[in-house]
Image (spheres, helix red, strand yellow):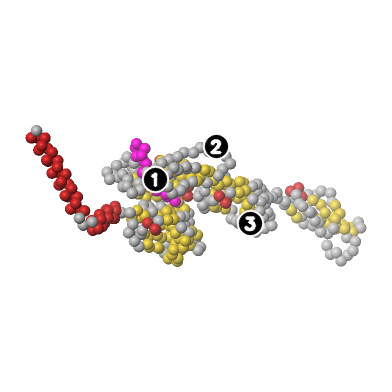
Amino acid sequence: MDQSWDGWKFLWSKNSNTESTEAAAKTIDSVKVSDGGEYRCRARRGGYYTHYSEPVTVTIYEKPNPKVTIKPDQHVFRGETVTLRCDIDGEGVTSWQYSWYKDGSGSVISELQEYTFSPVTESDTGKYSCYGAESQGSRTSQHSDAVTLTVSVFSVSQKWLTEGDSVRLICEVNSSSACWTFSWYTLTASSGVSPPVSLIISPSRTQHFTSVSLSLSCEDQSNSDRWRVKRYTDRWGLQDCPSLRHASQTGSTCTISSTITSDTGVYWCQSESGENYHPVNVTVHSGVILESPVHPVTEGDNLTLRCLYQHSTPPNLRADFYKDESLIQNQTTEMIISTVSKSHEGFYYCKHSERGESPKSWISVRVSHSESQISVLHTLSSVLAVCPYLLVTVVLIFKCCRMRVTSVEEEETSM
């Protein structure tokens, strides 16, 4: 209305209901769904009424309640990949801006619909909730109910031992549940002794990317099929190849068609009689990995390590290389150690400034059999060099003993 004329009063109606006299601007505090409807207004002065305005439809939506889902489960083990997803069923909203919160904190930890931990660690344990705001509008959602994520860890206490020591192994899991059962296994490590079978891994490295094919074969000198690939993982426990996800067994070869992080574990070969040989730690990771040898490196050989990233061409990264938490080489695509010795044993990993760091791999160094023989011969030659008459003395003692035995035999014959 042209309000320059005094004396006007304004009448409001909703859904053609009885009119109410209010101000020219109608304000509804804390709107509810029931406040929605068709609104019209007109003005009155004395006994004169204006026509009704064109109707305006006001729609009030309930704030949707987001739903949080966790895959693969609310209770997982360290090293797995865990994904939290926030779904909001908001009528008429095509795009949401998401916010994730942990343990009731007001700090936003992610703004993506899916919040992924890869790999998950104990510090990720907590209560998670999400909230949504319309990307191209003013609508918001409620805060979701909190969902609890629990990350457990299996651990075995250990120390370096010498022959004759006593040892106590304790297997623990940091969970409040009292329903755990524990199983113990002994694997033949083949240290210093040639095993009857070898576990061959293709690609030939201990760390592997997710969503790739991985082949593990048990090979002996007779190329027999009497061996089977077994494994133990934190997620699935003890398994044989046919029971693995996306895996198939052909002879003594196990092929995993598409790896996932929970394939991380210990793999070995088992005979038909139940003997276990050649355990190998295999790590499956979705980010940066370290290319390192599957089997121990022989002392005196060269060792080459590379830092790889699945989503770059070529996959080699210029990265920093570490041994036992100490930086040993920086900003290089590969690290080469010439003439490896026992001192080079340890945990190695690589780190890229943007892509992150790889898991750690243990590099083992063994003494070659030929070097052991050379060492023995060297020791003998040293002894002979120090005692030049030792060999002659031994020969004379031997001859004297033989002569004495012969003399005794002749006396007995004559009697």
Magenta residues, start to end: 268-283
Viewer-closest of 107 and 56: 107
The reply to whether discs 3 and 2 touch (Cβ–Cβ < 8 Å) is no
Residue depicted at 23% across the width and 58% down the height: 385
* Residue type, label 3: Val
Which residue corresponds to the image point at 31% horizontal and 47% vertical from the top-left?
A: 194
**CB atoms of marks 3 and 1 within 8 Å:** no
Quadrant of the image occupied by residue 164: top left
Q: Quadrant of the N terminus?
A: bottom right
Residue 52 screen position, x and y as percent: 81, 56
Dots 2, 1 in contact, CB < 8 A: no
Tell me if residue 281 is in the magenta stretch.
Answer: yes
Residue indicated by mark 1? 163
Q: Residue furthest left?
A: 414
Numbered label attached to residue 356: none
Image x and y of residue 48, in percent: 89, 58
Q: Residue at x 18, y 48 (%)?
A: 397
The residue pinned by badge 2 equals 179
- Provide the secondary structure element on which disc 1 rests: loop
Residue bearing the label numbered 3: 108
Count of marks placed on residues: 3
Q: Look at label 2 and name its amino acid.
A: Cys
